[in-house]
Amino acid sequence: MITHPQAMATPTPDPDEERRRIQTARLLAYRDDGPLAHALAGKLGRGLPPVPTTLAALLVVAALVVTGVLQPGPLLLLPVVITLLLVLPTAPRDHLGRFDWLTPPLLRGAEFLTMIAVGLAADAPKWLLFVLVYVVGYHTYDTVYRTRQSIWPPAWVFHAGLGWELRLLIIGVGAALDVLTPVLAVLTAYLFVLFAVESVTSWVRLDKASAQAGADAEQDLEASPEDQLEQATGEADKG
């Protein structure tokens, strides 16, 4: 007796597991970790809880600003080092806790506050600091908007964008060496070109794909039943 082979059943993905996977991917994208954070993530074990640790980094930097500790010179590396030491160990976490959605805004707040505090203490041009914060903020907004449309930015953008950790490290070293203004100018110009070009080209490519899909659908609707039957018959003959 000849038996027909049984089709392999495709396992149905667990909706709850899929939701957790997407939530983790989104929050990790919103963090904007760079190459240094990714390189260390696999060497830090389970890591530290992200929300209280990132909040602690933000509060410590704010305390340094309020107390007037930051003065020109190597001391300007202090808020950068504190932020790196506290926040980098949170990179390995899955960000599935009830309040872990607070991590990205806390981290962005710590990054921006450190940028501004170090920049002002080093007497960098205020307009240049504003432009840098704007460029990084635009990148964050673009990432959030894309992921909510299920359009994920390529991984290389986060590495090429240096991540929050390398951006802060570059700014801290530049301030400590008293060359922050040219460092800020180069960093801002580089990030502006990178994020603007990548974002525009991605959205243009998406618009072209959407327009092509709409044109194909409209063509299918306009095709007469005889044309559709003829096309189907031709495909069957080829098969």
Image: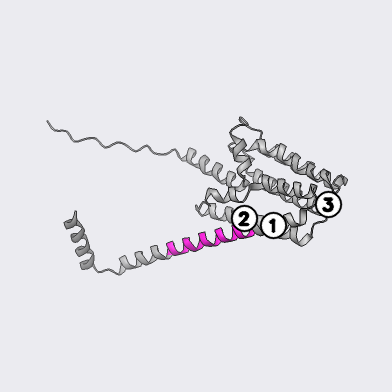
> Mark 3 packing: few (<14 Cα in 10 Å), some, or many (20+)?
some
**Does residue 92 appear in the picture of this structure?**
no
Q: Which residue is drawn at 31% across and 36% down?
A: 9
- Give the CA separation, mark 3 to mark 2: 26 Å
- Up the image or down, 89 lies above or below 205; here it is above
Q: Where is residue 150 in the image (x, y as percent from the top left)?
A: 50, 52
The circle drawn on residue 31 is none
User: What is the quadrant of residue 165 in the picture?
Assistant: top right
From the image, state whether disc 1 or disc 2 is nearer to you. 1
Farthest residue in the right direction?
Answer: 68
Counting residues from the start of the chain, the first of labels 3 and 1 encountered is 3
Which numbered mark, 3 or 1, is in the foreground of this view?
1
Q: What residue sits 71% from the left and 45% below the top?
A: 169
Name the kind of residue labelled 1 in the image.
Answer: Val
Quadrant that contains the N terminus: top left
Judged by depth in the image, the label closer to the viewer, 3 or 2, is: 3
Give the SS element for disc 3.
helix
Answer whether labels 3 and 2 touch (C-beta < 8 Å).
Answer: no
In the rendered image, which residue does mark 1 sit on?
Answer: 186
Left or right: 165 in relation to 15: right
Left or right relative to 77: residue 142: left
- Tell me which label, 3 or 2, sits earlier in the chain: 3
Picture quadrant of residue 131: bottom right
Say the numbered circle drawn on residue 139.
2
Marked residue nearer the N-terminal end (1 or 2): 2
Which residue is nearer to you in this view: 13 or 27?
A: 27
Apparent side of residue 139 relative to residue 149 in the rendered image (left or right) = right
Write the start and end of the magenta stretch as one range: 191-210
Name the residue: 19% across, 61% down: 234
